[in-house]
Amino acid sequence: MDKVVWDINAYRYFVTNRSDSEVEKAIQNLNTREKANNIESSFSVIVAQELLSHIADRTDPYFAVCMKAIKALYKYNGDSTEYRVMATQDLQISRIFFDSTLPSKVAHCEAIGRMLSEFASDPTPHVFIKHQQNLNRIKAEVYRSEQNFISDILHVIRKLDPTSTSWQLFANDPVQRKGMFENIRSESFKQMIGIGYIVATYAALKETGLVREHSDEELGDMAKAFASFFPEPIALFQELYE
């Protein structure tokens, strides 16, 4: 069975210029066709959080389209009793590589699912009041994640090229720049990305006391395996750096 996971823009494009009834009819048609072709959809918690972050404030310019997109997301991936959600990458890593889980992350996914259900089925003023603090928290978390991502990339750039004052590396040194591209496309770079994912999940598990001590060699072997099992995020990071 093939799996489909939409990003935030896919949902926003899907609902644009469609009424609620047209969106619902289009989803029913899509679900029927996917089922006939052995395709099943799931939603990403990250995408759900991005959509929810835009309904924390009614003056948000994307409030209306994201409200409609939230309804589409939930109805596309579930109903009033259950929904299909793709486990976040840290949950996948914790299960595959450490045979463990992160209870707080599971609880977070479940909480997001409950919020989506309420906003998709009956978005009354009471529902907004009930979840306003959570919406504010999600909005702040999404913003913080975006800023941290920017800071992390800039940190890498400055570390690799201390003379850089922009997003460019070795702008005036074609030899160094060529070598940088070769490095980005190398196997060692893939493993460097992999170790970042593995170590972050390992650190979170250690805080909960749910994982034994692992050596650097073991974590390195996991990073190599990660690069093989999860080529998509590796390729995305390589393209981003290029």
Image (cartoon, rainbow, N blue to C red):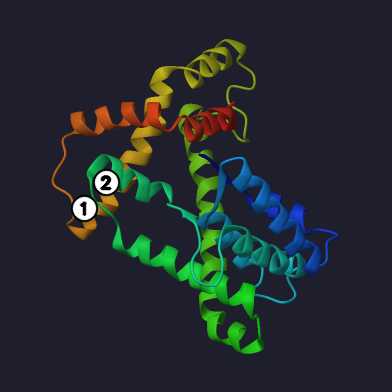
For mark 2, what is the residue?
202
- Residue 206: mark in rendering: 1
Q: Position of residue 60 (x, y in %)?
A: 73, 70
State how many labels appear.
2
Asked whether 23 or 139 is in front, the reply is 23
Q: Residue at x 57, y 58 (%)?
A: 77
Amino acid found under the numbered disc labelled 2? Tyr
Are the residues tagged 2 and 1 within 8 Å (C-beta)? yes
Question: Along the horizontal axis of the image, is 109 left or right of 127?
Answer: left
Q: Position of residue 100 (x, y in %)?
A: 24, 51
Task: Reply above or below: 51 against 189.
Answer: below
Q: Position of residue 158 (x, y in %)?
A: 50, 34
Amino acid found under the numbered disc labelled 1? Lys
Quarter holding residue 58: bottom right
User: Helix, strand, or loop for circle 1?
Assistant: helix
Question: Along the horizontal axis of the image, is 187 left or right of 38?
Answer: left
Residue furthest to the front in view is 36
Task: Reply above or below: 1 against 181.
Answer: below
Task: Reply above or below: 137 against 6.
Answer: below
Asked whether 162 or 213 is in front, the reply is 213
Quarter holding residue 121: bottom right
Q: Residue at x 36, y 62 (%)?
A: 106
For label 2, the crowd category at 10 Å Cα-Cα, with few meaning under 14, some 14 to 19 and many 20 or more, is many
Q: Residue at x 61, y 40 (%)?
A: 37
User: Helix, strand, or loop for circle 2?
Assistant: helix
Question: Along the horizontal axis of the image, is 115 left or right of 201?
Answer: right
